[in-house]
C-alpha cells in the first residue's frame, strides 16, 4: 500500500540544518556583479568571486529559496566526465581528470570549512544494458586504465558482488564518484558567502534583464544595476529570455522510498556504493541518502517531460504516468523492491542542450553577461566547478579553460514554439516510448 506523498520536494531536505532565508530585495541596489540563481552554479560563483575579489559588491538573487532548483532536487550522483557523448579516450581521460579534481576540490572545501554536508565518495556503477554496449564499455575501460584512470569493468559474479541489478550485461565501476546532499551543501555555504560580503536576496525573481554597460535587473520591488551579471539559472534560463534556442528545460521525475533496512541495502549492494545509472537514452539513475532512502529517477520517456513554453513547474501525483513508469523501471532493475512503499515523488528541470554539453562563457554587446548552463542532467560536479571557471573568466584569465569544449560555447539549434514542443513529442515517440521495456 502506497503511503501519502510529500509535496513536490526532495528528501534531501530531511535532516538538513535549519536555514533562515534571506529577505527579498526591497530597495534599488548597485553592485559590481549580480548573480541570478541560488543553485550550485550561483553559490559556487558567489563563493569564488567574493574570495578572489573581496572588495567587490556581489549580489545573489534567487527567485524562491536557495537550492529551489535542480541543485536541491536531483539524484545526488557526483559523476565524472562532461558529457556521455564523448568517446575519444584521450579527451575522456582529460575530462575525467578535470571533474575528479573538481570532486576533490569540493571535498577539500567541505573539510576546510567543516561544512555539515552529507556526502560519500564510495563510487558509482555505470550499467551496460546490452551485450554490445558492455563490450564497448569494456574496451573503453581498458583504454582509460592505460591512461591511469582507476576504473574497473565488472561482469558476471564480479558485478553481482558489487550490485545485484537485473538486466545488466556488464558495468563500469568508478570509485572516485559519489553522492552528495545538495541542500546541505548550499545551506552550509550560506554563512561563508555572507562572511565574504555577498548580499543574498531570496524570494526575488528577476523578471527582466536590460542589457547595457551597466545592466539593469528588474525584480518585483526594486531594480539592481550591475556592471556584470551571471546567468546561473540552468533550465529556467529560456524563461528569462536567454538561450531560447539553446536550452530545452526537460523535467525529470524522481521517487524515493522511506529509509530501507541496512541489511536489504547491503544484500542489493547499495549499502557500499553511492549509486548507479544506465546507458539508455532515457537514462535511469539511482542513489541512496545517508539514512538509506532509495532515490530513483529517469528510465523511460514517461519519467521525463517537456512542458509547452519552457514551463518548469510540475505537480506530481501518486498515480501519474511518471510515478508508474519510475516504479516499473525500478522493479525491472531491483525486483526485490517492486512493492516497496514510495514516500516521496518530485520533479526538477534539466537544462538539456542538443550536444548534451554544458556551456560556460561570457556574452553580450558589453561582454558582461556571464553564463554557465546546459549541464544536461550531469551538473552536480560541473555546476560546482563553474564558479571557478566563471571567476577566472571575470578576472580575464581564460587560458586554463580554452581547450575545453564548454569554453565560450553558445548552445543553439532548438526551434521555438510550437515546433519545440512538437519536436520533443515527435522525437520521444520516434526514439521509443516503451515504459518498462528492458533488455533481458
Ligand atoms: C531530477 C534531477 C536529477 C538530477 N540528478 C543528477 C545527478 O544525479 N547527477 C548530476 O550530476 N546531475 C544531476 N542533475 C543535474 C544537476 O542537479 C544540475 O545540473 C545542477 O544542479 C544545476 O545547478 P544550477 O545551479 O546551474 O541550477 P539550479 O540548481 O536549477 O538553480 C537555478 C536557480 O535559479 C533560480 N531562478 C530561476 N529563474 C530565476 C529568476 N528569474 N530570478 C532569480 N532566480 C531564478 C531557481 O529558483 C533556481 O534556484 C539532476 C537534475 C534534476 C532536475
Image (tube, helix red, strand yellow):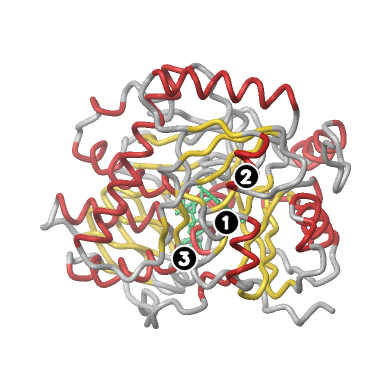
- Closer to the eye: label 2 or 3: 2
- Residue 277, which numbered label? 2
Residue 378 location (% of width, % of height): 53, 43
Using the image, determine if residue 190 lies above or below residue 304.
below
In the image, is 145 to the left or to the right of 157?
A: left
Where residue 184 sits, quadrant-wise, is: bottom left
* Badge count: 3
Kindly indicate whether the residue at mark 1 contacts the one at mark 2 (C-beta within 8 angstroms): yes
- Residue 90, which numbered label? none
In the image, is the residue at mark 3 within 8 Å of ligand 1 by its beta carbon? yes
Disc 2 versus disc 1: distance between alpha carbons?
10 Å
Where residue 4 sits, quadrant-wise, is: bottom right
Disc 2 versus disc 3: distance between alpha carbons?
23 Å
Q: Secondary structure at mark 2?
A: strand
Counting other residues with Cα less than 10 Å from the Cα at mark 1, is it few (<14), some (14-19), or many (20 or more)? Answer: many
Find disc 1 in the rendering and name its residue. 75
- Closer to the eye: label 2 or 1: 2
In the image, is 411 to the left or to the right of 97?
A: right
Residue 69 location (% of width, % of height): 53, 61
- Closer to the eye: label 3 or 1: 1
In the image, is the residue at mark 1 within 8 Å of ligand 1 by its beta carbon? yes
Visible residue check, residue 364? no
Find disc 3 in the rendering and name its residue. 67
Counting other residues with Cα less than 10 Å from the Cα at mark 3, is it few (<14), some (14-19), or many (20 or more)? Answer: many
Q: Secondary structure at mark 3?
A: loop
Residue 309 location (% of width, % of height): 71, 50
Visible residue check, residue 293? yes
In the image, is the residue at mark 2 within 8 Å of ligand 1 by its beta carbon? yes
Which numbered disc, 2 or 3, marks the residue that appears first in the sequence? 3
Which numbered disc, 3 or 1, marks the residue that appears first in the sequence? 3
Q: Secondary structure at mark 1?
A: loop
Amino acid at each position: 500500500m502506497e503511503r501519502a506523498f510529500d509535496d513536490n520536494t526532495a528528501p534531501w531536505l530531511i535532516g538538513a540544518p535549519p536555514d533562515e532565508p534571506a529577505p527579498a530585495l526591497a530597495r534599488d541596489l548597485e553592485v559590481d556583479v549580480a548573480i541570478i540563481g541560488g543553485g550550485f552554479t550561483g553559490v559556487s560563483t558567489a563563493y569564488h568571486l567574493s574570495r578572489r575579489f573581496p572588495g567587490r559588491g556581489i549580489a545573489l538573487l534567487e527567485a524562491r529559496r536557495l537550492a529551489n532548483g535542480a541543485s536541491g532536487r536531483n539524484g545526488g550522483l557526483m559523476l565524472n566526465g562532461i558529457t556521455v557523448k564523448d568517446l575519444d579516450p584521450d579527451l575522456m581521460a582529460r575530462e575525467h581528470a578535470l571533474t575528479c579534481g573538481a570532486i576533490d576540490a569540493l571535498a577539500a572545501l567541505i573539510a576546510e570549512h567543516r561544512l555539515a554536508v552529507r556526502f560519500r565518495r564510495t563510487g558509482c556503477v555505470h550499467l551496460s544494458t546490452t551485450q554490445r554496449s558492455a563490450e564497448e564499455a569494456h574496451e573503453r575501460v581498458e583504454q582509460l586504465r592505460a591512461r591511469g584512470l582507476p576504473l574497473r569493468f565488472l561482469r558476471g559474479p564480479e558485478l553481482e558482488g558489487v550490485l545485484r541489478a537485473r538486466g545488466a550485461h556488464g558495468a563500469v565501476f568508478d570509485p572516485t564518484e559519489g553522492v552528495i546532499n545538495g541542500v546541505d551543501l548550499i545551506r552550509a555555504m550560506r554563512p561563508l558567502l555572507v562572511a565574504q560580503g555577498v548580499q543574498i536576496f531570496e524570494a526575488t525573481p528577476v523578471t527582466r534583464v536590460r542589457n547595457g554597460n551597466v545592466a539593469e535587473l528588474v525584480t518585483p520591488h526594486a531594480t539592481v544595476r550591475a556592471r556584470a551579471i551571471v546567468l546561473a539559472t540552468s533550465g529556467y534560463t529560456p524563461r528569462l529570455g536567454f538561450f531560447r534556442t539553446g536550452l530545452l528545460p526537460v523535467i525529470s521525475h524522481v521517487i524515493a522510498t522511506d529509509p530501507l533496512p541496512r541489511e536489504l541495502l547491503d544484500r542489493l549492494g547499495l549499502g557500499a556504493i553511492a549509486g548507479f545509472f544506465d546507458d539508455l537514452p532515457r537514462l535511469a539513475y539511482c542513489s541512496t541518502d545517508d539514512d538509506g532512502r532509495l532515490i530513483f529517477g529517469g528510465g523511460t520517456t514517461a519519467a521525463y517531460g517537456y512542458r509547452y513554453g519552457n514551463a518548469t513547474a510540475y505537480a506530481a501525483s501518486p498515480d501519474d504516468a511518471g510515478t508508474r513508469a519510475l516504479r516499473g523501471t525500478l522493479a525491472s532493475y531491483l525486483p526485490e523492491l517492486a512493492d516497496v512503499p514510495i514516500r516521496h515523488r518530485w520533479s526538477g528541470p534539466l537544462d538539456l542542450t542538443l550536444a548534451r554539453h554544458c556551456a560556460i562563457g561570457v556574452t553580450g554587446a558589453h561582454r558582461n553577461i556571464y553564463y554557465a548552463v546546459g549541464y544536461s542532467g550531469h551538473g552536480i560536479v560541473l555546476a560546482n566547478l563553474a564558479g571557478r571557471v566563471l571567476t577566472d573568466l571575470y578576472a580575464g584569465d581564460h587560458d586554463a579553460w580554452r581547450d575545453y569544449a564548454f569554453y565560450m560555447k553558445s548552445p543553439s539549434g532548438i526551434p521555438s514554439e510550437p515546433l519545440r514542443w512538437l519536436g520533443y513529442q515527435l522525437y520521444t515517440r520516434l526514439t521509443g516510448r516503451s515504459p518498462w521495456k528492458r533488455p533481458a
